[in-house]
Image (spheres, helix red, strand yellow):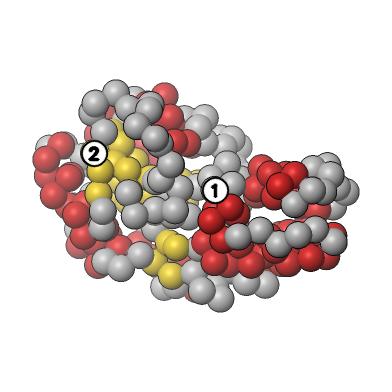
Amino acid sequence: MIQLVAFDLDGTLVDSSQDLAAATNALLADLGGVALSHDVVVSFVGEGAAVLVRRALERAGLAPDTPRALEQFLRHYDARLLDTTRPYPGMVETITAMRSSRRTAVLTNKPERPTLQILRGLGMDGLFSDVVGGDSLHGRTPDPAGLLHLAARAGVTPAETLLVGDSPVDLETAQRAGTHICLARYGFGYRFGGTGFRGDERFIDSPLALPAIIDEIG
């Protein structure tokens, strides 16, 4: 039986794509680079801000190792964290209902401070027992250490844990940790091309479909 449900943040719990794209293009404007489309920017999301910035600089024709570019991006993003970022429809209701019988947590490559700021700003901070950010001692996904830490803190086994995510990074994390995985096809990180699946994955097109998936797993 699933006792712990851990959620990825960007593209799974919340749609932060517009704010990430706006912050990225503000950085590129500072550095004299060309603006990138929303779709291009969000295709770089999922492996942490440093990777996003490096890929965006390269695509915009700028040096990927531009000094202090990451710091500049983080300043721009901090100013936009909650401009348009919102939970996906049905997410708050779904998590609220499942908390009566299961523990819930957040596992993200976003640093802990902005993660908590977003959760507080959206009134979601009380929905989770634990939060592990990408700047924790457990490293960044797809390293499974953070997910295994959440399971240990909850006093459950990996087999009793479900990771809900939207990207290949989330899939690899669950596979390496030995947990169940549910992939959100509505998320902006859902880019698979039919590869990387083992056949035991679950999929949802709305947060409201998650309880049925959990019941199916047992």
Relative depth, front residue between 59 and 98? 59
* Residue 125: percent from left, percent from top: 43, 65
Specify the farthest residue to the bottom: 83
Identify which residue is drawn at 23% across, 28% down.
200
For the N terminus, the quadrant is: top left
Residue found at x 39% / y 35%: 193
Identify the residue at image location x=73%, y=67%. Answer: 26
Q: At x 54% / y 66%, what residue is drawn?
A: 18
* Quadrant hosting residue 156: top left
Crowdedness near tag 2: few (<14), some (14–19) or many (≥20) residues, C-alpha within 10 Å: some
* Disc 1 to disc 2, C-alpha distance: 22 Å
Residue highlighted by disc 1:
43
Question: 66 or 5: which is nearer to us?
Answer: 66
Q: Nearer the viewer, residue 20 or 140?
A: 20
Q: Position of residue 37 (x, y in %)?
A: 60, 60
- Amino acid carrying label 1: it is Ser
Q: 161 or 63, which lies in front?
A: 63
Disc ID at residue 109: none
Tell me the tag on residue 202. Answer: 2
| Mark closer to the chain start, 1 or 2 | 1
Q: Is residue 54 visible?
A: yes
Which three-letter amino acid code belongs to the residue tagged 2? Answer: Arg
Residue 192 placed where, x, y %?
A: 40, 36
Q: What element carries label 2?
A: strand
